[in-house]
Image (spheres, rainbow, N blue to C red):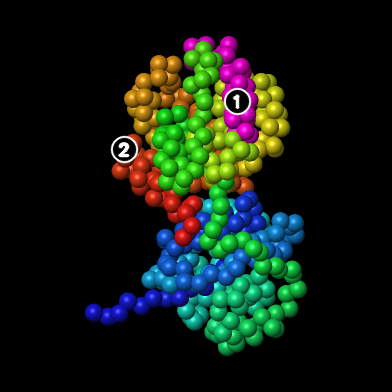
Amino acid sequence: MSDIIMSEVFICLGGNIGKREVYLHVARNLISKEIGTITKHSSIYETEAWGIDSDKKYLNQVIKVKTLLSARYVIKKCLEIELRLGRKRGKERYEDRTIDIDILFYNREKIVSKQLIVPHPKIAERKFVLLPMLEIESNFIHPSYNKTIADIYLDCMDDSEIAKTNLAKDNVKYNYICVEGNIGSGKSTLAIELSKRITAYYLPELFLENDLLPLFYKNPKKYTFLLEYSFLISRYNQLSKTLKQSRKCVVADYSFYKCLWFAKINLTKVDYLLFEKHFHALLETLPAPDVIIKLNTQTKNLIKNIESRGRGFENTVTENYLNKINKSYTQGFRKLTNTLVIELNIEDYNQELLTKELEEVDYFIKNK
C-alpha cells in the first residue's frame, strides 16, 4: 500500500466587518473541519484596508494546513466557508468583508486556472501577508521568485501600517449567543442544551408571562400594537439587565431583532413606522450578539411541534402565518451584515438529531 501523500497549504484569513476576531476564529474551525489540520498559525495582525478607501481596519492571519485535498477542492471549500460566514461579493474587487480566505501557496506548485492562481499573485506587494508568513515560515521559498519569504519581505515597498494584536489565536471569548427561528422550531430546546454544553447562562424568553398573548390570538386587530410594544420593552429590559450582570456567556432563545420581524407582519404600516423608530433607539444601547444560530425547518414540522406542546392559545396559528414569519425572518437576516449567523436545517425533533446539531455548532464556537 502506498503512503498517503499530504499537501501543505498556506492560507491568509482577513476581515474588517463585524466582530472580526469571531469570524477569524470560526473560519479556522471550519477549515480544520472541511480542509485539513492546521499545523501552524501566526499572530493576529491589525492592518489598514488594502486596495480600497475604507476606515474599517482588517484583522489578518496566516495559517499552514496539511490536507488530502487537491488545490481545486481547497479553493472550493474556502469559497463555501466564505459564503457561509456572510461574505457577499459585489462588483468591486476590493471591498469591506466579513471574511476573506486566500490560498497563498499549495506546496511549491505553480497553478494557473480560471478558479485559482497559486502562488497568490499579490504576495510580494502585501505586508499584511508577508509579516504573518514571516512569523511562521520565514525560510519558505517562493516558487516563482526563488526567494525566501524573509528576502521578499525586505524588498516589499508596502508602507501601510500593520500591528500585531494581543488577541489570542485560539481563545475567542463569546459573551452573547442567540438561538432564533420560527414558532415551534425548537429554539428553547437547543438553547438549553447549548448553554449546558458550554457552561453558559441560559436566558429564556418570558413570553408565557405576557397576558396579552392569548388576547392577541383571539383578537389580533385589537391587541397587536399593545402586544408587540410590550414584547419590545420586556425583551429590552431582560437582555439589558442580564448582559450587564452576567459573568458567563449568555445563550438566549431569542434575539432582540425578532421584535422588528414580528412587528413587520403584525402591525399596520403607520404603527410599524412608529415601532421601528423606537426599536432602533433601544437597539443602539444593546450589544450585538456574537453569534445568532438560525433554525430552519419545514412548516409541517412547525405545526407538528406546536401541536405537541399543547399551548391552547397557539391553536389559531396557521401555516399561512408561519410562512409570513419565515419570509420576514429571511428578509431580516439578510440585513444582519455585522453578525455571524449559523444556519441549521432541522428535519425532525429527537435527541439524536439534537446531538448532531450541537456538534455542528461546536465547529463555530469551540476553541480548537
* 224 over 155 or under it: above or below: above
In the rendering, which numbered label is found on residue 1? Answer: none
Near mark 2 (Cα within 10 A), the count class, few <14, some 14-19 or many ≥20, is few
Q: Quick one: 255 or 79, which is closer to the camera? A: 255
Q: Which residues are magenta?
A: 217-241
Can residue 93 be seen in this snapshot?
no
Res. 36 in view: yes
Q: Is residue 236 magenta?
A: yes
- Lateral position of residue 287 relative to residue 103, left or right: right
Q: Position of residue 85 (x, y in %)?
A: 53, 52
Relative to 195, is 144 on the left or the right? right
**As drawn, is 78 to the left or to the right of 357?**
right
**Residue located at (66% from left, 80% from top):** 153
Mark 1 Cα shell of 10 Å, populated few (<14), some (14-19), many (≥20)? some
Percent coordinates x, y for residue 221 in the rendering: 57, 13
Quadrant for the N terminus, please. Answer: bottom left
Kind of residue at disc 2 = Asn
Q: Which of the 4 quarters of the picture holds residue 104?
A: bottom right
For label 2, the residue is 350
Q: Is residue 238 positioned above or below 87 on the image?
A: above
Rendered location of residue 48, percent (x, y): 72, 64
> Residue 91 at what x, y percent from top left?
64, 56
Quadrant assignment, res 130:
bottom right
Disc 1 secondary structure class: helix
Foreground mark, 2 or 1, reads 1
Mark seen at residue 234: 1
Give me the residue at 39% from left, 76% from top: 6
Which element carries disc 2, helix, strand or loop? loop
What residue occupies the far bottom of the structure in this picture? Answer: 146
Write the residue at 39% across / 45% down: 357
Residue at position x 35%, y 47% from top?
356
Task: Say whether residue 360 is magenta.
Answer: no
